[in-house]
Image (cartoon, rainbow, N blue to C red):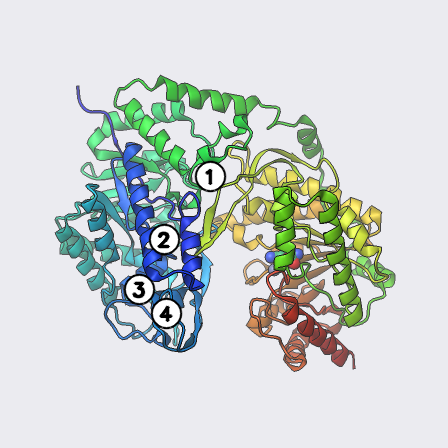
Amino acid sequence: MPNTKPAVASLGFPRIGARRELKFALESCWSGKSGAAELLDTAEHLRRKNWRLQQEKGIDVIPSNDFSLYDHVLDTAVMVGAIPQEYGWTGGDVSLETYFAMARGAQTSADDAGCGHAGHGRDVRALEMTKWFDTNYHYLVPELTEYQTFALSSTKPVDHYLEARALGIETRPVILGPVTFLKLAKARGSDFEPVTLLPRLLPVYTELLIRLHEAGAEWVQIDEPALVLDLTDDERAAFENAYDVLTKAVPALKLMLASYFGDLGDNAQTALNLPVAGLHFDLKRAPDALDGILAKAAPEQVLSLGVIDGRNIWRADLPALLERLRPVIEARGADKVQIAPSCSLLHVPIDVALETELDPELKSWLSFAVQKLEELSALARGLGGEAIDEALAAAGNALAARSRSPRVHNDAVAARLAAVSENDRKRKSRFSDRIALQRMKLGLPLFPTTTIGSFPQTSEVRKSRAAFNRGDLDRAAYDGFLQTETEKAIRFQEDIGLDVLVHGEFERNDMVQYFGEKLSGFAFTKHGWVQSYGSRYVRPPVIFGDVSRPAPMTVDWWRFAQSKTEKPVKGMLTGPVTILNWSFVRDDIPRSQTCAQIALAIRDEVVDLETAGAAIIQIDEAALREGLPLRKSEWKTYLDWAIDAFRLSSSGVADETQIHTHMCYSEFNDIIDAIAAMDTDVISIETSRSKMELLDVFTAFDYPSEIGPGVYDIHSPRIPATGEMTELLSLARKRLDDRQIWINPDCGLKTRGWAEVKPALVNMVEAAKALRG
Ligand code: GLN
Ligand code: ZN
């Protein structure tokens, strides 16, 4: 009997610790409460725990170097010595101080001590941060100059490989591939394509691979997720060049080249022709690619099949996978096949077993990182001929229960959605007619002033919420506290002369969670943290069923705030696309359908706010752009249903009711038609750091509606002077009609303190007055 059991590979395990150990260790270190040694200790402990856990779960190929203190792209930049000059690095090992300065910026005085501070004064900015592909993980963007040189400046991959080996655990080191690294980097100083630096970068990768081989590694996993992006011919050629050089330089070392987050599409031929020993594919995102891969891959290549979803939290259909994989093993032989999660498990929470308060039925449908490893290991045993009846039955039952469950399916929601017509997504009249009515009703001055919604979430606010959640503060006392805060905010806004007020969002923990907790079809975890960046983790809601709104969610707070003032108070909601994009979503219906369900719930809230008397309602879509697919060819489909959902949420009101939306820093150049199609009356955007250049596209498009270009950067504690804001506004006036312009900060003020917010907003109102003359 030939062996039919494939190896199980893990591409990466969450590094944060099941109890967020890494976060606490980092923050304690940064605040000087503990030293670097304690941090490094925690890190080592976490690595050991993860390796042992994976070993216990029967994982054959265990990764090392998937751990990072902050970010694996930053680790790679440091490893190749791509450290911008201002960090003062002069070669040799890169200190923790430099590493964290790149990650977070540094402002230290000469007597600072503690974590990573070498004790000399410095003041440097952090590297820019951006989204890792289409995930909510953010990486630090490497900066390279045209004359960039590279040198192996960290042996972390080798060190971690040896660390595991000393524990008796053989690992497959993971490194970020050179082409993806360059593709993610940005050019600094002059305009050039970073990928042209490849010939200078490859010797460093060669040196690293030699060292890994000398240390004893048989395989190295080299991640090239850029293979699922739209690439130029030069970029495809860079892949060919890179792997030709690397495989020739270290022929005895086997490379497992991993792509994930999508289909290889027009890069498939390039990828399959690379002379590497193994290839990993994301078969969750691209299930139909398997046949082509099997037909084209060289017979001696090891294929790693990413069949378990590394991006979502649903239990897998093990019986179906078993059937699907069996013929593959038969055809290729078990020694040429590995089974794996679709990508690193970095993007899912760690262990569902910790969720002791979650409804047991719902819990039985979920699979976090630990459970995903168990699923893979069961699958491999099943393929190997062992009886795995129990695992198959459990998976099959969970799936069957889920597909019939009344928790999941709500006929009323389905019926309502089926009855939605094009008219439900249309305002009654055109913008030009609506705005005339709104201007009459609102009677606002030229250049109306407002804010984006939230006011400082002070430690007092957060403490009260925590006390309420613990049960130490009762509902009445908590509500009383929130009312006082809200009323103070209203008084303040009136006093300084803002035109359109907000209630301040003191009652909200988070702009998505607040709504999710009030909607049916959402569940929340206690420990389901996922790294967003550095020591910041998020706990995305789980959308498990048809979404509906049992009762109004914001009307009482709006009514309370409006009762305290004659000025208009904006109703404040999070939009359907943003709620969707920041949640784990169902995999049994299309995303677009869940989005439309959320849209209907928000629509009801919008109408209820209007009925209560709100003349202006803002529907935030901070994550609309974030949701764009990786491939441009798929943008239109996404934008079509996303904009449809927004319109469905916003079109239930009368012409006189003014609909606002807000979007954070957004490059609108390539999606301005979609933004216009949202047909809002007012959009506020983050523009202060772009010197209003982001408005050019609105001008060019002849964008009809009103716009609030942010005039102050809320990410910085700096208080902008009136003059700075009038300066920015004069740039805006060159691009927009005066009647189109609103004056507001870049975004919500929840992360700032009142000491900054008060004078900044006073200055902002002054700027408006100056403009009005
Ligand atoms: N209304 C929200 C706030 O002011 C908007 C935040 C956002 O778009 N990120 O906080
Ligand atoms: Zn924003």
Question: Label 1 vs label 2: CA separation?
Answer: 21 Å
Q: Residues within 10 Å of mark 2 (few under 14, many from 20)?
A: many
User: Residue 659: image x %, image y %?
Assistant: 74, 55
Q: Is mark 2 within 8 Å of ligand 1?
A: no
The amino acid type, in three-letter code, at marker 4 is His
Q: Is residue 209 left or right of residue 371?
A: left
- In depth, the one of 482 and 617 nearer the eye is 482
Which one is earlier in the sequence, the residue at label 4 or at label 1? 4
Q: Which mark is residue 312?
A: 1
Give the image quadrant in which the ligand numbered 2 is located.
bottom right
Question: Label 3 vs label 2: CA separation?
Answer: 20 Å
Which residue carries the number 3 mark?
78
Which one is earlier in the sequence, the residue at label 3 or at label 2? 3
Residue displayed at 21% across by 63% down: 204
Question: Label 3 vs label 4: CA separation?
Answer: 17 Å
User: Residue 723: image x %, image y %?
Assistant: 66, 82
Query: Viewer-nearest of labels 2 and 4?
Result: 4
Q: Residues within 10 Å of mark 1 (few under 14, many from 20)?
A: many
- In depth, the one of 432 and 571 nearer the eye is 571
Which residue carries the number 2 mark?
226
Q: Is residue 157 above or below residue 121?
A: above
Query: Viewer-nearest of labels 3 and 2?
Result: 3
- In the rendered image, the quadrant that contains the C terminus is bottom right
Query: Viewer-nearest of labels 3 and 4?
Result: 4
Which residue carries the number 4 mark?
117
The amino acid type, in three-letter code, at marker 1 is Asn
Which one is earlier in the sequence, the residue at label 2 or at label 4? 4
The amino acid type, in three-letter code, at marker 3 is Val
